[in-house]
Amino acid sequence: MLQTIRERKSLQLLGLMLPGGFWLILFFALPLALIFAISFMSRDDLSRPALPLTLANYQQTFDPLYINLFLFSVGLSLLTTLITLLIAFPVALFMARLPKRWRNIMTLLVMIPFWTNFLVRTYALQFLMRANGPINTLLLSVGLIDEPAQMLSTPFAVLVGLVYGELPFMILPLYTSLEKFDWSMIEAAQDLGANALKTLAHVMLPLTAPGILAGSILVFVPSVGSYITVELMGGGKINMIGRVIAQQFGQSSNWPFGSAISLLLMIVVTLAALVYFRIGRGERGAV
Amino acid sequence: MANDFAVELREVVKLYGTMAAVDHVSMSIRHNEFFSLLGPSGCGKTTCLRMIAGFERPTSGQILIDSRIMGLTPPFQRNVNTVFQSYALFPHMTVEQNVAFGLEMKGVARAEIARRVGEALALVRLPHLAKRYPKQMSGGQQQRVALARALVNRPKVLLLDEPLGALDLKLRKEMQIELKTLQRDVGITFIYVTHDQEEALTMSDRIAVMSHGKALQIGSPLEIYERPACKFVADFIGETNFLEGRVTAINGEFATLSVGAGQTFTGRRVNGLRVGDPATLSVRPEKMQLVEHPVDGAVNTYEVTVFSIAYVGSDTRVIINLGGQRLDVWEQNSTSTLNPDDYFFKPGEKAWLTFKPENALVLAQ
């Protein structure tokens, strides 16, 4: 009797897991396995992945050209993460201290950009920063510059595009952790002799670390692999690792090499995230 | 020196919008005193404490700590420490780290910190839990940590905001005695906010009774209980009976009041009462007696009907009917028998109510 109930329970559990499991296998595990397989293949006369198996694709990724591209991508993404954090923290802090009703309205405002297609928004940003765009026109008319500043097709433009696009992903997790923050902690710290800076360093940051960690991962990971922003803001002159991958699968028709870079990027990002979380956990003690 | 007080409030006002949370409060708290701010929620007691700590600024008036005007001095530069109602322990630090926090902020040497943290934890009898995190401890233990974290800084004044509010009754009673003993031992001025009158009476040297932002009376527990200055204090502290009436005669310290259908009562009067004024007689239930036969010519003596009785162990609580008004009378059960009839009158029986004029107060309306 007990046995059959237990069996039925585990059957029910299996039933519940089926849709999610099916989804994961079809859209995550299977493509990943394919990429893994292709990354060890060579190409036939029509550039299609073919046998024999080879390690050449991986050897090619260690070309200084790609190493530098990778370092540049990581550096720019780290900078993006830092800047979004510096902008998002005061915003999230402000939101969390508003009355309840206003908080929901502010959350909505932060999410409104999502209602417009990302491509369209990036084009709008591109338009703003053009040589004869509104920003240059304004700076020229005020007399701050004598000739239009070259903003597009620079690392700066890509950085602006990334910060703009990723900002909500930093604000929302930060806001979530600040909203739950117990403000009497601040008073306790001040009562015990901590000034604003010490309160921030010893109490506020450690206690909001989960939000900072989540926001940083949410910003950093898509930034490293970003493609559209690099393509549009970089004007074809700035290259990042995401764009290289896209090129290999597109113009260059080199799926095996594209697969190899994709896998390596994924491994590096996963390792970085793990290390980051480990540090974060140490920082937060037994919370 | 004229103002040799630990803390002084001079005509302090705190407005929120147009609402006065604290309304012209003045009080002087002596060195090494256990001083309580007592009142119902919303009476302004916590706001007073927060202004002393520096978390809120008075709209007008002055606050002095150790004879120095505080003005805009931020909390981290005031020689006071707070024990918060929620304890506000840092969840990411161990007990030890929590207690050390204040000393670290002041840049005290490492060895000195270790020594003083050890002393503070010994003082609250928690040295064995130094490595625990707050979440792994009971409410009572967290309370002690909060106390140690504040006391380790050796503040001039310790501010306590209903620190026992979250504890169960038995633990509360224990902690009340412990806090009082601790205060005597460390010799630090305690300012203690509570809405629990028994707590305030048990622990305090002096109490300020507050209501609607005003300090109605400041005095020792004895003064507050035996000589309340107004109706609110008489009602808020302990139990009392009120009889409304009009002053018919004044005789030295005493006033006579005519109430209801022609009965007159005499009691101690507060200053400023005149013949003809409306007034209230306040008499505590344990200060009246019920007798079978009245003494001839005795004042404050009338025939009443017993309405209900409740035996509560140490005494019997009787509700009587005096000309349509119900009064509480508590009779001490000073002899032990098993016969219920020995304990008192039964409901419906007639009895005589009597009390001495010294045991009643005539208060202004």
Image (spheres, rainbow, N blue to C red):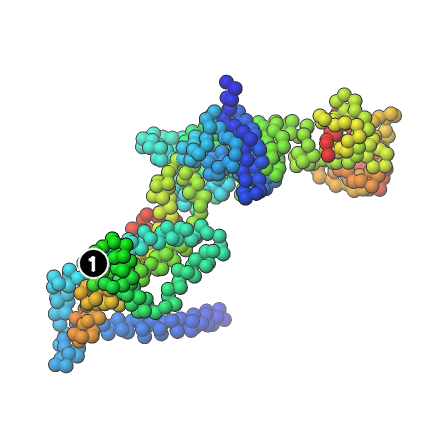
- The residue beneath circle 1 is A147
Residue B116 x %, y %: 38, 30
Identified at 37% across, 41% down, the residue is A196
**From the viewer's perspective, is residue A7 above or below residue A92?**
below
Q: Does residue B88 appear left or right of residue B291 in this picture?
A: left
Residue A17 x %, y %: 40, 71
Q: Secondary structure at mark 1?
A: loop
Identified at 31% across, 66% down, the residue is A124
Image mark count: 1
**From the viewer's perspective, is residue B13 above or below residue A241?**
above
Q: Amino acid at mark 1?
A: Glu
Q: Does residue B30 appear left or right of residue B302 in this picture?
A: left
- Give the camera-side residue of B48 and A284: B48
- Give the camera-side residue of B96 and A239: A239
Can the viewer see residue B104 in this picture?
Answer: yes
Q: Quadrant of residue B119?
A: top left
- Give the camera-side residue of A265 and B75: B75
Identified at 46% across, 58% down, the residue is A104
Can the viewer see residue A227 in this picture?
Answer: no
Residue A116 x %, y %: 36, 68
Identified at 35% across, 54% down, the residue is A88
Residue A265 x %, y %: 22, 64
Mark 1 nearby-residue class (10 Å; few <14, some 14–19, many ≥20): few
Q: Does residue B109 appear left or right of residue B60 in this picture?
A: left
Q: Quadrant of residue A11?
A: bottom left
Q: Quadrant of residue B334?
A: top right
